[in-house]
Structure formats: C-alpha cells, structure tokens
Image (cartoon, rainbow, N blue to C red):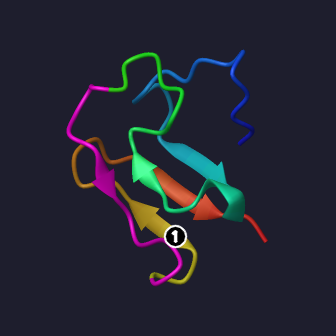
Amino acid sequence: MSNSSAESLVPNACSRYAVEADQLPLHCPMPGSSQWDSHPKVYLPIKENGGTAKCPYCGAEYTLKD
C-alpha cells in the first residue's frame, strides 16, 4: 500500500492491508489515516510473525510484501 501525502487512509474501511518493508515498524492505525485516533496506536510485530499481523483493536490484517 502506497502512502503518499495526497492519500488519506480511512481506518477500519477495509480489513486487509499489504505493507512494504519501508513502512515498518508497523502500527495500527496506519500513518496518513484520516481518523488516526480511531483506537490507540498499537505496534504490530509483523516480521516476527512470519509476515502477517492482526490488530487486536479493529481486527485489520496486515501482510508484509516481499
């Protein structure tokens, strides 16, 4: 998922996100989110979990791109 300044992510709008290594450390909500305070920021250990992580607050699922 590209994260340019022109984009505004809507938290909880979708349940699956693909992230790139340059977006680590991963946290939910993602940077650039229009409602960055939809829940407390939580860091997700995606690399330590084999390239996948799930937010305990909103249930969003993240996959690390190759």
Please identify the dominant SS of the magenta region. Answer: loop
User: The N terminus appears in which quarter of the rendering?
Assistant: top right
Q: Taking 8 as reference, is 64 above or below it?
A: below
Residue flagged by tag 1: what amino acid is it?
A: Thr
Q: Position of residue 10 (x, y in %)?
A: 48, 21
Residue 47 shows in the view: yes
Q: Which residues are magenta?
A: 37-48
Would you identify the image quadrant in which residue 22 lies? bottom right
| 36 shown above or below 44 | above
Q: Is residue 10 left or right of residue 29?
A: right
Q: Relative to 20, is 9 on the left or the right?
A: left
Q: Is residue 59 left or right of residue 51?
A: left
Describe residue 14's horizontal placement relative to residue 43 as left or right: right
Residue 51 position in % (x across, y down): 58, 75
User: Is 21 part of what is drawn in magenta?
Assistant: no
Q: Which residue is mark 1?
A: 52
